Amino acid sequence: MNSKQNTIRAIIVEDELPARETLEMYLAKYCPEVSIVATAADANKALETIRTVEADLVFLDVELPYGNAFDLLEKVGEINFETIFITAYADYAMKALNHDATHYILKPIDIEELILAVDKVKFVLNEQWKNENNNQIQTVKDYHSLQKKKFVFPNLSGFELVEIHKIVKCKADDNYTEFVFTDGSKKLISRTLKKVEEQLKEYGFLRVHKSHLVNLNHISSYQKGKIGTLLMSDGSEVSITSSKKSILMELLG
């Protein structure tokens, strides 16, 4: 990974404190490129954490209080992170792989296996970031004139058309997306942010965070930091992840 994308933001989901602390210790010592941004000890807390915390990777214990890892992933919905399953039972290995796990590790954790799994994640993420960056830059290059087009908002009696340049940003709300407009009004539609992103990415919109899609024409300023912050034209602030900073800089020239 290049210097701008050398940190893997990770969540650890593990109900046993000693096991969680051991994994954190191993990662700090042998995989320093992994930054633990959150932990969870049961399926309910894990669901809330995964939905709200930006992460590239989730270390996921299979057996959890209030559910198991596979049920949890079904509830999460849109999976935009890599997964390393951790289990004490070899029987779960095939099921983990069938769920597109990047890797699985048997307890007690073997350091070499952990390093191998993280290296695999690094490779996968590096390829994803490289492709996403190239595609995003190519897609968004000439968006200014396209923002005069209109976006369709369905309602009970039909639909409403709103000019795209009036959309400041879009925010994820589970399986809904909230649109914020230049006049301060908002609209909530039954569509995931991922689907909205697919519709708007060629019109000058960039997914800068797990939960935010912003209109490049409405970015007023950028504040550096471990997680940067964008000030939007409506006065609101939006976090931007490290993997998106280089794309933003290139798109804004």
Image: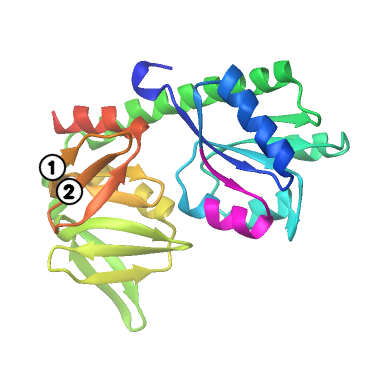
- Mark 2 → mark 1, Cα distance in angstroms: 5 Å
Quarter of the rendering occupied by the N terminus = top left
Quarter of the rendering occupied by the C terminus = top left
Q: Are marks 2 and 1 in contact (CB under 8 Å)?
A: yes
Q: Residue at x 69, y 31 (%)?
A: 22
Residue 204 appears in view: no
Q: Position of residue 94 (x, y in %)?
A: 81, 35
Tell me which corner region of the image, top left, top right, bottom left or bottom right, holds residue 134.
top left
Foreground: 41 or 6? 41
Tell me which corner region of the image, top left, top right, bottom left or bottom right, holds residue 23.
top right
Q: Amino acid at mark 2?
A: Leu
For mark 2, what is the residue? 231
Q: Residue at x 53, y 22 (%)?
A: 122
Q: Is residue 40 magenta?
A: yes
Secondary structure of the residue carrying tag 2 is strand
Q: Is residue 102 above or below residue 12?
A: above
In the image: residue 132, left or right of residue 39? left
For mark 1, what is the residue? 221
Q: Is residue 38 above or below residue 1?
A: below
Q: Earlier in the sequence, mark 2 or mark 1?
A: 1
Secondary structure of the residue carrying tag 1 is strand
Q: Is residue 114 above or below residue 237?
A: above
Q: Position of residue 62 (x, y in %)?
A: 76, 44
Residue 21 appears in view: yes
Magenta segment, which residues? 37-49
In the image: residue 120, left or right of residue 174? right
Q: Position of residue 111 (x, y in %)?
A: 71, 19
Characterize the local packing of mark 2: few (<14), some (14-19) or many (20 or more) Cα atoms within 10 angstroms: some
